[in-house]
Image: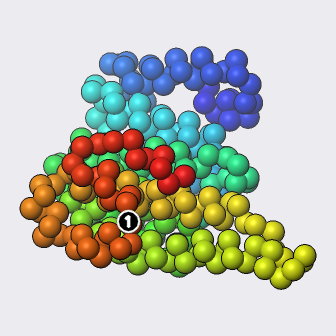
């Protein structure tokens, strides 16, 4: 059904897909399908052509998520083949043909799946989480990487919680923020700067920069709300953080408020 849906985006198939996913999530008698489903997801996500189809990749991630949710399924032997393909959905440079398509949600959904897999099988496979962290930090946590890749890395790491944010994101948070802010300022400054023949405003680049900033703010909030004030004081130089992030830090103390949309 999912394969068929790949070739036809007709809305009539939506209920079929929902039914299939529900079956994978709840059926107690489909253990023998695990090797097939694992291969289906992994090979689908390794196909370069598919990686330009956000809708189809999202479906494959949903299949993996449904498999993880089914308490009757044992995925142990098949998890290893899923990591790189699912990780690609988090950090790939390009996951769609048009900037209008929502590849951001796909990156987050793929990251949530890997976090869920670690929660379920991390005790059994102790190298799993370090491998994912290595992928996210090496592939995505560099300012010379595409913005969409940086976004995926930041979201992926932050979903592992305050300790991961502390270890991997706090040390680079100020550098990243200042780098993005600098580019945003120059984009706005360059707009129309040379008389009538000025450059057209690159709104998509601005949007990508804002998405990265929001992901980093969310990550810092996860840390701030997840540790005691004493730990905060030890780990974060609040003064220099305030210089960089300004008033955006206020809602991170200590109770959740609706700050999320403030920056966009």
User: In the image shown, does 221 or 91 lie closer to the viewer?
Assistant: 221
| Residue 49 pos. (x, y %) | 69, 53
SS at mark 1?
helix
- Taking the image as shown, residue 258 lies to the left or right of residue 19, namely left
Q: Is residue 122 visible?
A: no
Q: Position of residue 1 (x, y in %)?
A: 62, 25
Q: Quadrant of residue 97?
A: bottom right
- For label 1, the residue is 246
Nearer to us in this view, 23 or 162: 162
Name the residue located 41 percent from the left edge and 31 percent from the top edge.
66
CA neighbours of label 1 inside 10 A, class few (<14), some (14 to 19), many (20+): few
- State the scheme by which the image is colored: rainbow
x and y percentages locating residue 258 in the rendered image: 39, 41
Q: Is residue 233 left or right of residue 182?
A: left
Q: Nearer the viewer, residue 31 or 247?
A: 247
Q: Tell me which residue sits at (45%, 20%) in the image.
A: 22
């Amino acid at each position: 059904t999912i394969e068929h849906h790949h070739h036809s985006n007709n809305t009539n198939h939506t209920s079929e897909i929902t039914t299939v996913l529900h079956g994978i999530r709840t059926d107690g008698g489909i253990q023998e399908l695990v090797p097939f489903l694992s291969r289906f997801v992994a090979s689908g996500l390794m196909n370069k052509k598919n990686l330009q189809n956000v809708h189809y990749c999202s479906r494959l991630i949903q299949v993996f998520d449904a498999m993880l949710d089914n308490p009757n399924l044992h995925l142990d032997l098949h998890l290893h083949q899923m990591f790189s393909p699912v990780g690609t959905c988090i950090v790939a440079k390009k996951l769609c043909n048009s900037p209008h398509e929502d590849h951001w949600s796909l990156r987050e959904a793929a990251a949530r799946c890997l976090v869920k897999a670690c929660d379920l099988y991390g005790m059994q496979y102790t190298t799993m989480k370090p491998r994912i962290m290595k992928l996210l930090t090496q592939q995505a946590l560099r300012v010379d990487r595409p913005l969409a890749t940086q976004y995926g890395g930041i979201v992926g790491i932050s979903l592992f919680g305050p300790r991961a944010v502390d270890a991997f994101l706090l040390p680079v948070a100020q550098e990243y923020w200042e780098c993005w802010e600098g580019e945003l300022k120059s984009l706005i400054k360059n707009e129309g700067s040379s008389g009538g023949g000025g450059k057209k405003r690159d709104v998509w680049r601005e949007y990508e920069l804002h998405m990265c900033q929001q992901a980093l703010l969310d990550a810092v909030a996860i840390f701030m709300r997840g540790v005691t004030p004493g730990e905060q004081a030890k780990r974060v130089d609040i003064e220099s953080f305030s210089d960089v992030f300004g008033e955006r830090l206020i809602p991170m103390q200590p109770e959740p408020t609706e700050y999320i949309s403030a920056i966009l």
